Amino acid sequence: MASTRNINTVGNYNLEQRQFKQSEVYTLYPNSQYGAAYDTKLPGNGVNPAQIPWNQLSYNAPDIESFLFGINSTNLVNPAGPLRPELKSLQTANFFEKTPTLMPEPLAVEKNQRPFPTPN
């Protein structure tokens, strides 16, 4: 019996393949919401901590991760050599500049004072 449903037509097949390709391009675009940032920076003044991809903190991230998980640690035929991490130096992203803290020159802390005096 021949298929009479619309899912087996050439046009529908091409439409589905186009949707799959567009979804793949949208998801795998390097600077999309799922991808990497244009310029990765560490959070500074006025910025909450963010999620940083594992490969943005060092140049040899897979080697470091394999070492931390203990992969190839019990290989007696070809033992792994010592790990030398190659860390990246990331800049910080500051939203505002901090002003220096002003401290009095003769800093005298008196023991008989409280920040909120209690009534007697």
Image (cartoon, rainbow, N blue to C red):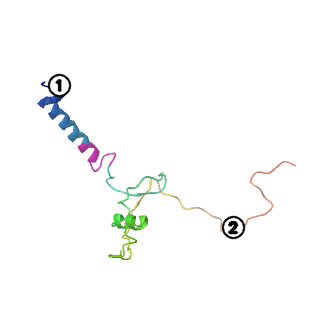
> In the rendered structure, does residue 29 fall within the stretch colored magenta?
yes
Residue drawn 48% across the image and 55% down it: 45
- Report, in whole angstroms, how far the alpha carbon at label 2 lies from the one at label 1: 84 Å
Residue 94 tag number: none
Vertical side of 13 occupied by 106: above or below: below
Q: Give the range drawn in magenta.
A: 24-34
Q: Nearer the viewer, residue 44 or 55?
A: 55
- Inspect the image, locate mark 1, and give the three-letter code of the amino acid beneath it: Asn
Residue 6 tag number: 1
Q: Mark 2 touching mark 1, by CB under 8 A?
A: no
Vertical side of 75 occupied by 20: above or below: above
Q: Which residue lies furthest to the front in this view?
A: 1
Is the residue marked by circle 2 packed among few (<14), some (14-19), or many (20+) residues within 10 Å? few
Residue drawn 60% across the image and 62% down it: 102
Can residue 111 be seen here? The reply is: yes
Between circles 2 and 1, the one closer to the viewer is: 1
- For the N terminus, give its image quadrant: top left
Q: Residue furthest right?
A: 120
- Inspect the image, locate mark 2, and give the three-letter code of the amino acid beneath it: Leu
Q: Where is residue 94 in the image (x, y as percent from the top left)?
A: 44, 56
- The first of marks 2 and 1 along the sequence is 1
| Quarter of image, res 64 | bottom left
The secondary structure type at the circle numbered 1 is helix
Vertical side of 75 occupied by 25: above or below: above
The secondary structure type at the circle numbered 2 is loop
Q: Position of residue 108 (x, y in %)?
A: 72, 67
Q: Where is residue 67 in the image (x, y as percent from the top left)?
A: 40, 68
Mark 2 — residue? 107
Can residue 89 be seen here? The reply is: no
